[in-house]
Amino acid sequence: GDFPEEVDTLVIGSGPGGYVAAIRAAQLGQKVTIVEKGNMGGVCLNVGCIPSKALIEAGHRYHDASNSEDMGISVGEVKLDFTKVQEWKASVVNKLTGGVEGLLKGNKVDIVRGEAYFVDNSTVKIMDDKSSQTYKFKNCIVATGSSPIELPNFKFKEGKVVSSTGALALEEVPEKLLVIGGGYIGVELGSAYANLGSEVTILEGTKSILPTFEKQMSQLVAKRLKKAGVTIETEAFAQEMEETENGVKVTAEVKGEKKEYEANVLLVTVGRRPNTSELGLEQAGVEMNDKGFIQIDKQCRTSESNIYAIGDIVAGPALAHKASYEAKVAAEAISGEASEIDYTAIPEVVFSGPELASVGLNEEKAKEQGYDYVASKFPFQANGRALSLNESEGFLKMITRKEDGLVLGVQIAGKNASDMISEACVAIEAGMTAEDIALTIHAHPSLGEITMETAEVALGMPIHIV
Ligand code: FAD
């Protein structure tokens, strides 16, 4: 056996959960060790949020370059060097992962490379290719994230049948791309490749793509996708696959009818599962539910009081900013602070065309929860900035409590919804009313004015619509 090393706070995983937890814990005076078996930055920085947004941006630029005639801009042949696109994407990822490592070191966090495995509720073994070292910890924050679900009939095969990770790493733009799953990852990557020139088909099992968003919002995206040549099949269930010389042939049942699709690349994005089965959590006594999610209290504490869990391995939306938020709560809880998780103002965003963003309650949920509410809406079309951006499609919808105008929720479909939603998050977090927003001076011309004007709609006196 080896001599155990003693550490105070041990963080397992360096994604947006783990690295943020490590930094906040160090800021609060804890002695922190972080262990990572793969690349610094987790899914988010390496194969998630960041590289996907880079590909989406490349898609927009390529598409817009040859589609700006209505603004009086026409160019000759627009060329795409996808190898260069991939190199640029990698450079963005490298800057950020290097940055994370620098931040950890700057905060005096010890970095250990290897895979952690629990021996009991205060001991882990960390293994790499060659060796194994035992660590005794006082407190541990588990942030091991999630992995793509593989369907039995559609086993991953490099370059042909891919998860989101493989789709981000393709060496060329596939002529035909078939996507199983019309959730946000399928829609984001599907539209990126459509803009880059692929002929894309999306198979979605429910009645619409992006089923967690309001119908009017997901319909806007579906309309834009169709305009870009994407075929969307709803109530479509992929059943089996056969490999062909250049790709795959997939059989699906679409609205009860059997159909066949050929593609060079098949992207399967049907959800992710928590990385909790190979961690030895049973030996530590940490309780999980039947889907493998770790159960936590309001301070992210598991059934073992010195072990915390955050991010994709606990219930709730699998989003980077949720992981980072929980990270701060867990680190603060270890330092004895009274921090608690409150998901009221967690935004959800899709980087589709147009972007979708939502925070707080939508109309349906306000109704369900018995609120007497007002739903106000303002179109992008009536905003000068939106028109000058040539982005007049979309709307902002605000749900306010009838008695006092308290902002309960905001949904946005339109250009830069991902940035605009932050103002709504602040409003909800701070308990602001429609009047507070309407009385705030917003710069002109800006998309932010749409938020102000929607608040004015709620008060019954908008300036730019009648
Ligand atoms: P992860 O980021 O998964 O990190 C876990 C880390 O733990 C990994 O580095 C892993 O190697 C390490 N690890 C696991 N087991 C061990 C072990 N035993 N020992 C040591 N290390 C271990 N979210 C958004 O908010 N916005 C987006 O735009 C967005 N886009 C996405 C696009 C794609 C294609 C994908 C796949 C995801 C996207 N997400 C997005 C989701 C986001 O990436 C995740 O919610 C987030 O990364 C979860 O963070 P985490 O810290 O819980 O885990």
Image (cartoon, grey):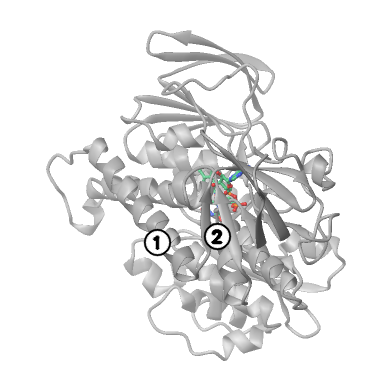
Judge: label 2 CB < 8 Å from ligand 1.
Answer: yes
Q: Relative to residue 310, is residue 37 depicted above or below?
A: above
Three-letter code, disc 1: Gly
Is residue 462 in sight in this rendering? yes
Mark 2: few/some/many CA within 10 Å (<14, 14-19, 20+): many
The residue at which mark 2 appears reads as: 19
Element carrying mark 1 = helix
The C terminus: image quadrant? bottom right
Q: Residue at x 18, y 39 (%)?
A: 79
Three-letter code, disc 2: Tyr
> Residue 233, percent across and down?
57, 29
Q: Looking at this view, is 437 or 329 the one in front? A: 329
Judge: label 1 CB < 8 Å from ligand 1.
Answer: no
The residue at which mark 1 appears reads as: 99
The N terminus: image quadrant? top right
Residue 423 bears which disc, if any?
none
Q: Relative to residue 101, is residue 13 depicted above or below?
A: above
